Image: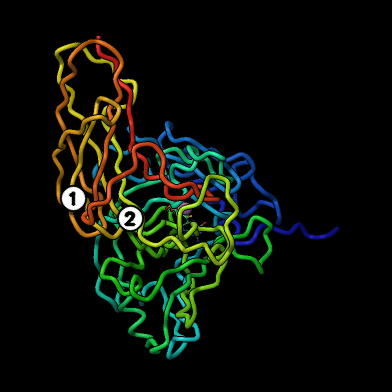
Amino acid sequence: MRRREFIGKAALASFTLTAGTGIVYGELMPKGYVPLLMQDPDPFKMFSIDKDMTVLNDRPWNIESKAHLLNDAVTPNKFMFIRNNGLLPEAIDVDTWTLTIDGESAKQKKTYTLNELKTRFPQYTYHLTLECGGNGRKEFNPPAKGNQWGVGAVHCSKWTGIRLRDVLEDVGVKNDAVYIGYHAADIHLSRSPDKEPISRGCPMEKAYQDETLLAFQLNGEDIPLAHGYPLRLVAGGWPASVSGKWVQRISIRNIVHDGTKMMGTAYRVPCKPVAPGEKVADEDMCIIESMPVKSLITYPKTGALLTLGQELTINGHAWAGELEVAKMEYSIDFGSTWHACELKAPVNRLAWQQFSANISFPQEGYYEVWAKATDSNGKSQPMLLPGWNPKGYLNNACHRIAVKVS
Ligand SMILES: Nc1nc2c(c(=O)[nH]1)N[C@H]1C(S)=C(S)[C@@H](COP(=O)(O)O)O[C@H]1N2
Ligand SMILES: [Mo]
């Protein structure tokens, strides 16, 4: 009789991470066995997220938040959207986790342990707005393929880590450097080890900004697995796809990074406006950089019931990619007239800003409250839909809620 083979340490560690508790007798699981918890996992338990979050897809996991869940100035983990292009990394071992910096424009190839990163470089904390480039995709017509995000693929949480710049300078950057590209530990849907689910990056200028971090903490704790544990690139104000989760390697490139999802229609939009449905030549597509001005009414929840004579205080957040939001307005007459909201300064650059307004309604009936932000360059959100593009990116239309007064 052949001796029974048992599960490997690494596999057991990843199951334990998913279970969120110790697996009793786990070491006795047969080799290759997939426990039930992995076959039919409960994403709400697995990711410690609120039951009102919407699961758009389970392979890979894509989970959306909702406007009224995002009312906090600092988004807690339980309300953060999750966007994965592949399968979660398996068997993360923080004791052996390393980050390697390499690439044509690196003066040397250098590898750091997590502990070296945490102890050798100064640490910084910033509130950073991360919005998926495809947030709002479901409104476009003709429809675009991909996760049909409503308004909930955005968060602004508190990230702690070290500056990417400090690490790049420690390695040494050649004069011909133009871009950085990340490589991560998540697994391609095909499970092929030769394919990456995603490998994006940003120009050196963005990589060198003070707020561009290699983060290991989210809201004062270890980053949750779904958001990039144990090490994540965070580049606020740009499409969140630049913020690589589970980062293991960063290449300093002498060309625009050509990794997975840097080409074709992925995170690229027509450089000039096109008609809805129009075919766009590859050379006429531009990589999305700073995200456009946008806002969200997070209180009250759409569908609020009010009594006549009762004043309504709305509040929410506004953000504008690399810029600041300069003005915030609301309308209750479908955009015919606009009134000023109160708008706070951001706690730091690239953090969303809080707004509020007290609204009176003149008579009983159905109303919509529309919100419109204007950035520091004077650009405002479009009232209904911005320019169509093949993959349905950058929908920064005014957010609207319904209220009934009786
Ligand atoms: N390694 C890796 N990093 C990634 C992704 C991914 O699939 N793999 N998805 C990107 C995309 S498209 C988005 S919108 C954000 C989502 O971040 P979140 O899941 O923490 O909200 O992570 C980005 N970083
Ligand atoms: Mo995204």
Looking at the image, residue 261 sits to the left or right of residue 178; the answer is right
The residue lying at 34 percent from left, 47 percent from top is 155
Q: Nearer the viewer, mark 1 or mark 2?
A: 1
Residue at x-position 71% and y-position 55%: 32
- Residue 340 appears in the picture as rendered: yes
Residue that label 2 marks: 218
Evaluate if marks 1 and 2 touch, with contact meaning CB atoms under 8 Å apart.
Answer: no
Rendered view: 192 above or below 107 = above
Ligand 1 closer than 8 Å to the CB at disc 1? no
Q: Is residue 69 left or right of residue 255?
A: left
At label 2, the amino acid type is: Leu
Q: Is residue 35 above or below residue 106?
A: above
Q: Which residue is mark 1?
A: 326
Q: Quadrant of residue 3?
A: bottom right
Question: What amino acid is at disc 1?
Answer: Ala
Image quarter of residue 39: top right
The chosen color scheme is rainbow
Where is residue 28? Give x, y as percent. Answer: 65, 52
Residue 169 placement, left or right of 7? left
Residue plotted at (51% across, 37% down): 55
Number of other residues with Cα within 10 Å of mark 1, as a class: few under 14, some 14 to 19, many 20 or more: many
Q: Earlier in the sequence, mark 1 or mark 2?
A: 2
